[in-house]
Image (cartoon, rainbow, N blue to C red):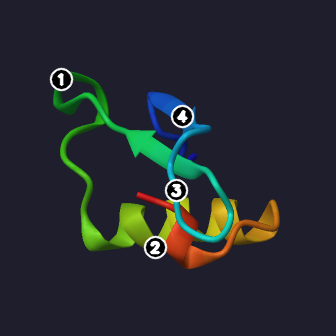
Amino acid sequence: RNLPDIILVDLGGGGVTGFLLVFIEVVATDGPITMQRREAFMQIAADAGFKPDTVA
């Protein structure tokens, strides 16, 4: 499964939406975020209705 270790929401993230969704991956668990994992995380966000410019 492609799940990040931590998901944070910065409610003071500025921009049009006023928030920023942040995925955090601890390298000691599943390793660094590869392009494949990044795409999976972005898909998780998209499926939840988040636009790419509100995800980090």
3 vs 2, front mark: 3
Specify the amino acid type for callout 4.
Answer: Ile
- Under mark 1, the amino acid is Ala
- Cα–Cα span, label 3 and label 1: 31 Å
Q: Upstream in the sequence, badge 3 or badge 2? A: 3
The residue lying toward the viewer, choosing from 37 and 50, is 50
From the viewer's side, name the closer residue of 4 and 31.
Answer: 4
User: Is 47 drawn above or below residue 1 in the view shown?
Assistant: below
The residue depicted at 29 percent of the width and 72 percent of the height is 35
Secondary structure of residue under mark 2: helix
Image-based side of 26 in relation to 38, left or right? left
Toward the top, the furthest residue is 28
Q: Which residue type carries mark 3?
A: Gly
Q: CA distance from mark 3 to mark 2?
A: 24 Å
The label number, if any, that marks residue 28 in the structure image: 1
Which residue bears the numbered disc 3? Answer: 14
Helix, strand or loop at label 3? It is loop
Front residue of 11 and 55: 11
Residue 21 place in picture, x, y as percent: 55, 49
Q: Position of residue 38 (x, y in %)?
A: 39, 65
> How far apart in space, not on screen, are marks 1 and 4 (Cα)?
17 Å
Q: Secondary structure at mark 1?
A: helix
